[in-house]
Amino acid sequence: MSPSSGSRPAGHGDGAGRADVPLPPALVEASAARAAWLALGAAIALPVLHAVRVLAHGGAGVSPGAEVVTRLVLLGTVLCCLALFVLRRTHPGLARPFRAWGYPWSAAVVLIGAAAFLVGAAIGDPINAAAAVVLVAAGFVIRVIV
């Protein structure tokens, strides 16, 4: 078969060493579960690490950008936990690629903790909290338009 023919023998991939073989469903489910745990871990760890840094330095040297990012991560965590509760309530029969460990208690603990951090941050620095709300609102507007 000539390289210019445009077709490849069966079983050959895209030239990058990948074969045209679908992944087994168990591997896909395991990958989705790992990704969900990684996202949950990051959503919990990032604000906590930031709070520890702020406490360790007495609030000195913390950039306003880091404050806004922390608020956005906290807001995202709150919204994801709320979405989990709403989805489980409104679509109980929907297929799920992974289980939410300890549901509903684990999600409730994360939701309450993130909301408490978010409220405390908003009370402590209302200007950056308002900036985070504006960014999230702009994201919703852009999502609706696009």
Image: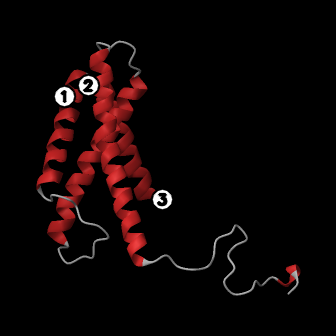
Farthest left residue? 105
Q: Amino acid at mark 3?
A: Val
**Residue position marked by numbered label 2 in the rendering:** 126
Q: Residue at x 22, y 22 (%)?
A: 124
The foreground one among 84 and 109 is: 109
Give the Cα separation between the discs numbered 1 and 3.
33 Å
Q: Nearer the viewer, residue 83 or 28?
A: 28
86 or 28, nearer to the observer: 28
The numbered dot on residue 13 is none
In the drawing, does residue 62 fall left or right of residue 15? left
Q: Mark 2 and mark 3: span between their CA atoms?
A: 30 Å
Residue type at mark 2?
Answer: Pro
Kind of element beneath mark 1: helix
Disc on the earlier residue, 2 or 3: 2
Indicate which disc residue 120 carries. 1
Q: Which residue is mark 3?
A: 146
In the rendered image, which quarter contains the N terminus?
bottom right
Residue 74 in picture, x, y percent from top left? 28, 40
Decide: few, some or many residues near mark 1? Use Cα within 10 Å; few <14, some 14-19, many ≥20.
Answer: few
